[in-house]
Image: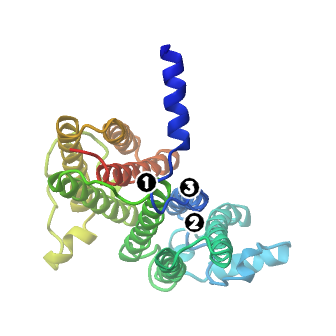
Amino acid sequence: MSLSGAYQQQSQAALAAPLPPAVNRPVARWLFFVSFLLLCMVVLGGVTRLTDSGLSITEWKPVTGAIPPLSEEAWQAEFTKYQQIPQYQQLNQGMSLHEFKQIYWFEWAHRLLGRLIGFAFFVPFLWFLLRGKLDRPMAWRLGGILVLGGSQGLLGWFMVASGLTERVSVSQYRLAAHLSLAFIIHAAVFWTALDLWRGRVVRVASAGLSRATAVVILLLFLQIVIGAFVAGLDAGLAYNTWPLMDGEIAPAGMFSHTPAWLDPFENTITIQFLHRRGAELVALAILGLFLAVRARVADPRAKAAAHGLLAMLVVQFLLGIWTLIEVVPVSLGAVHQAGAFVLFTLGLNLAHRLRRAAA
């Protein structure tokens, strides 16, 4: 038999082979799409923060708020509400209506996308459920994700409310909580999609590699949380040189906040220092994991996932440096946040691959 004939027979056998247990590709495709929408949401949220647009809408109207102002009178009414909050009175005094419209559209688009994601999740979920395409455990899992999504909407308004009375921006604590929950929801959606795309685990790589991958994902998540504090306090503007912070590894003013236990959350110098060191720690952890996978795992798909994670690490690290030295322009800041999302996603993908890779 020729080589081409043997190859065709193998291909036909692979196509005819039954899929692993619990594979549900239509549901998985839907969840992958939801994950993509979550990426868009995180990026748009970053743009909203970088442009100080998040407080331009001072009310939370879950249904009617989807309709923007449609007349000059309606625009003026929204602008008048904005003029009552500290951000306008202390930072944007004298802003024109045209300038207000520019920040309003960012926040309106962010909220509209949140509504669309809720719609894009709830309607297909209900459709799959009613048609019997979800078994009981999967229905409960997806129902839990739906509850998390609803909680994210409430948390988003709780965040905005923190900047409407006494502050000129939202609380960095609430911003970090809001971004953290977005990544938790994404992790739940993406992992579930992978389960449904690849099927149940049939073999597991070494426990050591699984734990190492979990540590890397945890470090990535903590770095993202620190990044939220950087964004919330504009700490990226404190020092804009690299690798040193204006000639020093640890500049004066670090850990000088009172009380001391709040310093890592409220001192912009300390927060930027922690974000830099966190990036270095994540880089070392991913490099170590990559070398371990190459040495101990035979599955070429797991190795490819490790290569993808390492390549994205390099891109994200360089993006972070570029964003820093350019003094955090909106475009680079948004791309850097998107890079964090992609890097986190590739970490999840590697962890999932290793659960079914022979060591």
For the C terminus, which image quadrant? top left
Q: Nearer the viewer, residue 123 or 7?
A: 7
Q: Check disc 2 and give the amino acid type.
A: Ser
The mark found on residue 91 in the picture is none
* 260 lies left or right of 30: left
Residue 55 place in picture, x, y as percent = 56, 74
* Label 3 vs 2, first from the N-terminus: 3
Q: Check disc 1 and give the amino acid type.
A: Phe
SS class of the residue under badge 1?
Answer: helix
Which is closer to the viewer, label 3 or label 2?
Answer: 3
Residue 167 place in picture, x, y as percent = 44, 79
Question: Residues under labels 1 and 3: Cα distance?
Answer: 10 Å
Figure disc tally = 3
Instruction: Tell me the residue that label 2 is attached to.
Output: 53
Question: Residues under labels 3 and 2: Cα distance?
Answer: 23 Å
SS class of the residue under badge 2?
Answer: loop
At x 45%, y 60%, the residue is 21
Q: Quadrant of residue 194?
A: bottom left
* Label 2 vs 1, first from the N-terminus: 2
* 280 lies left or right of 155: left
Instruction: Tell me the residue that label 3 is attached to.
Output: 36
Q: Say above or below: 76 vs 101.
A: below
Residue 88 place in picture, x, y as percent = 57, 74
* Local crowd size for mark 1, using a 10 Å CA cut-off: few (<14), some (14–19), many (≥20): many
Is the C-beta separation of discs 2 and 1 under 8 Å? no
The mark found on residue 341 in the picture is 1
Which is closer to the viewer, label 1 or label 3?
Answer: 3
